[in-house]
Amino acid sequence: MKRLLFVILALALVFSGFASTPMVMAAQQYKIGVLAPAVTHGWVAAVAYNAEARLKELGSEVDYRIQTSSNAEEMTAQLDDLMTWGAEAIVAFPQWEGMEVPMERALDAGIVIVNFDIVIDLEGIYRVSGDNEDMGVQGAYYIVNKVGPKATVVMLEVPTSGSVSALRKKGFLDTVATIAPDLNILTYATQFTREDGLKDFADILIRNPKIDAVYSMDDETSLGVLQAIREAGRTDIKVITGGGGMQEYFQLMPENEDIWIQSALYSPAMVRDAVDVALQVLKGEEVEAVKIIPTTLVDRDNYLDFIDDNSPY
């Protein structure tokens, strides 16, 4: 009997020990992939930088892979690689046309897709973007305010950038039609690089002896435009807009008192929000399908508020 009581007491002590020991649950880890263009532009480089920085900040909560590509075909192959890897969510910056079909395939496989910046017309995709159309609206008001409603303005569009250029162009032209229908708009195609801005605008200057303002959609393009103006010795141009948030461009704003240099802030750090949206969806949190970050204009009057010595762009 004593032996039986001893066994019962020992078992009770063992089970009470189990009960008092807290159970340690392994935290769930989410697999997130990032698809970004290859670095041909400082802004794009800063997108990849900020995406990886945010993923690192999330620590063991996420396992991630970042892929960069030079065209739609390469990005499609990398999307397939991420699917094979087991990505549960993909943050994509699809700069090229032709990504609808592969992204639809990923959606059908149950993968969360968060597009950064670019609009792709597929049901079920989340998107984080600056307000491209409003950048055009604000650019129109800025130019008309500086040079008047009957000035000659060169608009530099970038058709190869898809919805980015299309929306900025739409916002600009729609606003001009309302506030300055007599504005003389000369439209030329270029790219989002300072080299193309320099080359293309040098030719535009030869063709047009009188220009009052330039509606440029990108800071790097605008740097090339500004160089072309200086090299040509032109003094007629009084406004150059831009877009992105490039520190080098900001620094030029107070140095050129004869030209109003403006940028519509479109920070590459917005991709951090895209990463957060992907994680929130995976956790089952309620998220808006589209998150639009408002436009902020920067010029010589407020540029000091936006100087960031740690920015990679």
Image: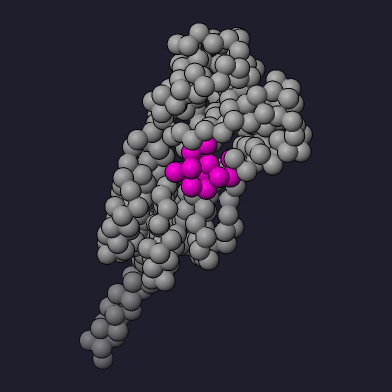
- Taking the image as shown, residue 191 lies to the left or right of residue 136, namely left
- The colouring scheme, among rainbow, by chain, secondary structure or one colour, is one colour
**Residue 161 inside the magenta-drawn segment:** yes
Q: Residue furthest right?
A: 179
In this view of the protein, which residue sits in the foreground, 18 or 198? Answer: 198
Query: Is residue 294 toward the left or the right of residue 127 in the image?
Result: right
Q: What is the quadrant of the C terminus in the image?
A: top left
Q: Residue at point 41% right, 49% down?
A: 96
Residue furthest left as drawn: 3
x, y percent for residue 143: 67, 25
Q: Is residue 76 magenta?
A: no
User: Chief secondary structure of the magenta span?
Assistant: helix
Segment tinted magenta in the rendering:
157-168
- Quadrant that contains the N terminus: bottom left
User: Is 251 placed above or below 136 here?
Assistant: above
- How far from the left and from the top, in percent, is residue 159? 48, 43
- Report x, y in % for residue 274: 48, 49
Query: Which residue sits at x=53%, y=66%?
Result: 123
The answer to whether 177 appears left or right of 161 in the picture is right
Q: Is residue 310 visible?
A: no
- Up/down of 272 relative to 282, above or below: above
Q: Residue at x 43, y 66 (%)?
A: 104
Residue 177, position in %: x, y?
A: 73, 38
Determine which quarter of the picture holds residue 28: bottom left
Q: Quadrant of residue 63?
A: bottom left
Could you tell me which residue is drawn at 31 percent across and 45 percent down?
Answer: 70
Q: Nearer the viewer, residue 53 or 267?
A: 267
Please indicate, yes or no, whether residue 151 appears anywhere in the rendered image: yes
Total numbered badges shown on the rendered structure:
0
Left or right of 183 in this view: 245: left
Q: Residue furthest front?
A: 207
